[in-house]
Image (tube, rainbow, N blue to C red):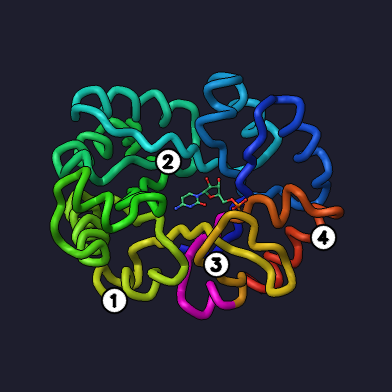
Amino acid sequence: MGRDVIIACDFSSKKEVIDFLSQFKDEKPFVKIGMELFYAEGPEIVREIKAMGHKIFLDLKLHDIPNTVMKAMKVLSSLDVDMCNLHAAGTVPMMEAAIKGLTREDGSRPILIAVTQLTSTSEERMNEDLLISEPIDKVVMHYAMNAKKAGLDGVVCSPLEAGKVHDVCGSEFVTVTPGVRFADGDIGDQVRVTTPEKAKEIGSDYIVVGRPVTQADDPVAAYKRCIAEFVG
Ligand code: C5P
């Protein structure tokens, strides 16, 4: 699987996202659509951005009983998204059901990746609220292995964990990594960040970049810089 840059389109309305994407003339970036935009605008926003020629990572993080996830994934697959995700905490049977739902009649399907533990979950909260007593690194790698066992393609993780995920799950297992900032840029509310260049060195397959591109004075130039540093 080739390396690519995914722009996190964290906008709250169709107008904002279409205005933003209309600035791109020669490039058709891979874009991430999250819950905010999807819940605000519905599946039509996916069809519209797809029709503009973009690949889409639909970041809805499904987590429910296997039958419900299977049926929901079937709907997402028919929307022709390129990548989608779920919570590995839903267990291996739920992830297997997701693959079943996603797989189209011709055998094709979107890339499916798992969230292991959210980066907003501290080890303390995981221990006390979720009653999971193992160290968080061990839990993340165990969930990644479960995702692999269920037939998923990869996980969302910090770029700093991408090397370890590849060591544990193999080099073909995809790592999709947010928390990316330019060396001379603002880190904002992210804590553990890395540059596109460093993410490439560690072995991320896809970097997810939001504000460094969406809030840049020249978003197209910022996107091209990501591509040059990460892919180029
Ligand atoms: O603007 P920024 O580059 O921080 O955006 C990163 C994107 O990746 C956001 O959509 C954020 O919700 C998402 N994300 C993240 N950390 C995770 C999982 C997803 O920053 N662990």
Residue type at tag 1 = Asp
Residue type at tag 2 = Cys
Residue type at tag 3 = Val
- Hey, which quadrant is residue 78 in on the image? top left
Quadrant where the N terminus is found in the figure: bottom left
* Category of crowding for the residue at label 2, using alpha-carbon neighbours closer than 10 angstroms: few (below 14), some (14–19), many (at least 20): many
Magenta-highlighted residues: 198-208
Q: Which residue is drawn at 34% across and 24% down?
A: 72
| Labels 2 and 4: the sequence-earlier one | 2
**Label drawn at residue 221:** 4
Q: Residue at x 71, y 35 (%)?
A: 52
| Labels 1 and 3: the sequence-earlier one | 1
C-alpha distance separating marks 3 and 2: 23 Å
Tell whether circle 4 marks a residue whose Cβ is less than 8 angstroms from ligand 1.
no
Residue under numbered circle 2 = 84
Residue under numbered circle 1 = 167
Q: Which of 71 and 129 is in front in this view?
A: 129
Whether 205 is among the magenta residues is: yes
Residue type at tag 4 = Ala
C-alpha distance separating marks 2 and 4: 27 Å
Q: Which residue is drawn at 16% across and 44% down?
A: 92
Secondary-structure class at tag 4: helix
Whether 162 is among the magenta residues is: no
Residue under numbered circle 3 = 193
In this picture, residue 207 sits left or right of residue 188 = left
Secondary-structure class at tag 1: helix
